[in-house]
Amino acid sequence: MTESVHTIAAMPAARAPGCPFDPPKDLIEARAHGPISRLPFPDGHQGWLVTGYDLVRAILADPRFSSRKELMKHHPLIDYGDIEVPPAPPGQFLMMDEPQHSRYRKPLVGKFTVRRMRLLTERVEQVTAEHLDAMEKAGTTADLVTAFAKPIPAVIICELLGVPYEDRDRFQDNIDKFLGGEVGDEELIAAYIATETYLAELVAAKRADPTDDVLSDLMDSDLTDEELKGMALILLSAGFDTTANMLALGTFALLRNPAQLAALRHDPALADSAVEELLRYLSVGKHFYRVALEDVELGGQTIKAGSMMILSLATANRDPERFSDPHVLDLRRQDGGHLAFSHGIHQCLGQQLARVELRVALPALLSRFPALRLAVPADEIALRPETADIYGVKSLPVAWDA
C-alpha cells in the first residue's frame, strides 16, 4: 500500500545564509519528513526527490532506474518544453546503461586501480610542492583556487591523458564555463564545442603518434576516434573539476573548523579518514538523475515508469539514520560508507586518483603554512551557484605569515 508522502514545492536553489557547507534547508527538512518526497517539475511532470541514504544507494545499484540521457526529458529547475533530448554522444558513458556503459568503462578500469593511483603519489607530491613553492615566493596572500586547487588536479589529469602542459589553461577555462553554472547558454555551448574540438585534435594526434598515457593506450582497441573523444571528455572534466572544488571547499571547511584543522595538521596519519569525512560532509557532486524504466515499489511508494528521480547525495551523506551527528565535521569519524563517489556501475572511475590528490595536497598545504587563514570574512567568500553541476567556491582568498 502506498503511504502518505511529503511534497516539496520546488527544487531548492539556494543554501541558507552563513551555511556554505550544508545542503539547502528545504532539502534537510524534506529528509526529516522521510527518505522520499514528491517533486513537481517546472514542466508539470510529477517526479521524486530521494534524500535518504538507503534509498539513494539502492536506486544507484538498481538497473530498473536508468542513466540514459535521452530519457532525461524533465529538469527540476528548467522547463525544456517540446525539445527532444538526444542520446549521449559516443563514449560519454556516464549517461548510458548496460551494455553500452561497460563497452566504454571496461577498457579504463585497469588504468585507475588503487595500486596504479598510489604509484602516482610521488608525482602528486612533486606537483603539490611546486605550487606551494610558487605561493610562498609570491608573497603572503593568494587565491587558493587559482594558485593551488585548480592547477594540481589539472596537471595530473593532463599527464594521465597526454594533454600537453601548455594546453592546460585552455581546457581548464572551458571546463569551468560549461560546468560552473554561471555563463549564458551561448557561451556554455561555445566552451563545450571548443573542448570537443580540442579533444578530437588530441585523439587524432595520439592515433598518429602514441605516447605514454591513458589515451594512447586505448588506440589498440576497437574504439573509434569519436568514441575516444567522448571518453576523454568525461575523464578530463571529472578528473579536474570535482577534485579542484574538493581541495578549495575542503580547505574552506577546515579553516572554519579550527579544531579539526589542527588535528589534521598535527596528525598526518589522520589524512585518510579526514579525506573520507570531507567527501561525505561536503558532497560537491550534489545529486544524480535517474529515470524509472518500469513501475517500482520503493520506500512505500509506487514509482511509475518514466518518473524522474533526483537523488540527493548531499542529504544522503547527512542522513541521521546512517551517520551520527551528520552535520558535524569529524575527521576521526568511523561510520564511513559515504556516497560521494556514487554507487553501483556508475561509481566514480577516478575515485582513487581523487583520494591520492586530496591526501597529499591538503596536509601539505597546512604543513607549509601553519598560520593559513581566510583573507576576507567568511561570508564574503564567493560560492558556486546551485545551478552548477559541481558545488564549490569561485575564489578563496587566503593569507599566511611570512
Image (spheres, rainbow, N blue to C red):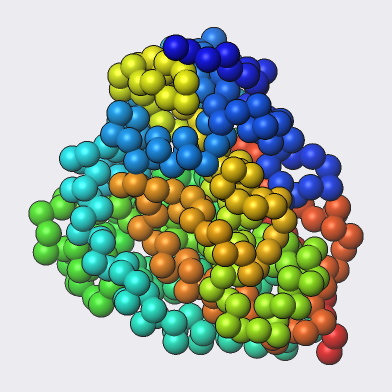
Q: Is residue 363 left or right of residue 209?
A: right
Quarter that holds the N terminus:
top left
Q: Is residue 63 left or right of residue 280?
A: left
Taking 314 as reference, is 282 above or below it?
A: below
Q: Is residue 384 above or below residue 49?
A: below
Q: Foreground residue, 165 or 52?
A: 52
- Where residue 127 appears, as percent x and y from the top left, is 52, 82
Percent x, y for residue 279?
57, 59
Check the image and report above or below for 399 versus 55. Answer: below
Q: Is residue 148 above or below residue 317?
A: below
Instruction: Residue at 47% x, 35% y: name it.
Output: 55
Residue 281: x and y in percent read 63, 55
Residue at 32% over, 77% down: 115
Q: Residue furthest front?
A: 1
Residue at the spot x=21%, y=55% of the render?
106
Q: Residue furthest right?
A: 377
Residue 333 position, x and y percent, is 62, 64
Residue 371 located left or right of residue 316: right
Q: Is residue 26 visible?
A: yes
Tell me if residue 364 can be seen: no
